[in-house]
Amino acid sequence: MRCTKSCVMATFAINSLLDYKTEKYIVTKNKAVGVLHRLFQLSVIGYIIGWVFIVKQGYQEIDDAIQSSVITKVKGTAVTNTSESGLLVWGPEEYVIPPQGEDVLFVVTSFLETPNQKMGYCAESYKVANARCSVNKDCKKGKMVESGHGVMSGKCIRNNENSNGTCEIFGWCPTEKDIKPQKPLLKNAENFTIYVKNFIQFPKFSFQSKSNILETTDQSYLKKCRYDKKQYPYCPIFRLGDITRRAGCNFQDMATLGGAIGIVIQWDCDLDKGTSHCNPEYQFTRLDATVSNKSIAAGFNFRHARYFKNAAGESYRSLCKVYGIRFHILVHGKAGKFAIVPLVINIGSGLAVMGAGTFFCDIVLLYLTTGRKSYNDKKFEVLKYEKQHTSTDVDIS
């Protein structure tokens, strides 16, 4: 039986699939390159063991989809005495906004009050630029005052005929005082405390909920402890003055015009060691721009009003522009647990990197050593192809 040329090629292709091919190694007696190669291998092994497995725990599967709940409570009292408000005692129900105990809360440290405002006609504030006037026609009746406090009545109010004035408006009168506080009115706010209760869980590993509160039977622990990284690292009660100090700010300076501070709770949990090694770490940082108090971007404030009626049924309000510190409680974290897949992947990646050492040493031998020509001749063999005339028909009988 004879086989055609195409049959021979097909037979050769099938047989080649069953061949085993191995690499050819050349032993080079070059101590310098040999030392370089071993140093590279040791560096890669040290990286894999030291950094990947010990530091980064590359043998673990990671869950960074942390589920978290934060509950806050502020305690402390302060006293203020102003000409507008008189003598007042401030408790958490007055200076904490909102009072529900959320993960974002605002603590009042200073305020400006415009009491007993009544709906009526009065002169707009002179600091509202588009409400300034010299004659009545500058005040278009019914026009809203941009960045102002009401609607123009069409009348220009001036102290005398030779001076400029402001348009009369219909709104809450008298208009708000537009001044900045020079110091915080709630001076004792520095000693207020925030109780931060945090619960976390990692659903990927069915890790049950854990809190940032020290597990103890001492009923008085929360009454006497204050967070300190060394003495009380697991105490969830923070003094406001200590928070701003750890964020790199002076409390009294910040409390004058307000600002924003982030309390970051970081959970890094090694579940191979048990839940006792899953503990929070705290970081404190100022979130708003730490610019000079003279800048227009400095501080944080907002307004709110209290409405009431007198005995005659007339409606009044007291407008408060409050300054203070806004606290943002941010929870981050991840949990790791041993798994075979990341272990194999990291070992395979390390072995692949070790192969780069051989490539680098080849480059050195081929281009940088004195015996590079000899090494090149041994490493690369040039085979000249010679065309052979064979019969198209092969007898395979």
Image (spheres, rainbow, N blue to C red):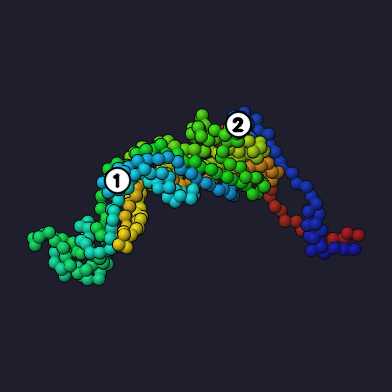
Q: Is residue 364 above or below residue 65?
A: above
Q: Is residue 263 above or below residue 176?
A: above
Tell me the element at label 2: helix
* Quadrant position of residue 48: top right
Residue 68 in the image, given as x and y percentages of width and height:
56, 48
The residue lying toward the viewer, choosing from 291 and 209, is 209
What residue is pinned by disc 2? 39
What residue is pinned by disc 1? 86
Q: Which is in the foreground here, disc 2 or disc 1?
A: 1
Do we see residue 122 in this rendering? yes
User: Disc 1 marks which amino acid?
Assistant: Gly
Disc marking residue 35: none
* Quadrant position of residue 207: top right
The residue at 32%/48% (across/down) is 111
Do we see residue 371 in this rendering? no
Left or right, 301 with reference to 327 = left
Q: Tag 1: Cα neighbours inside 10 Å, few (<14), some, or many (≥20)?
A: few
Residue 82 in the image, given as x and y percentages of width and height:
28, 45
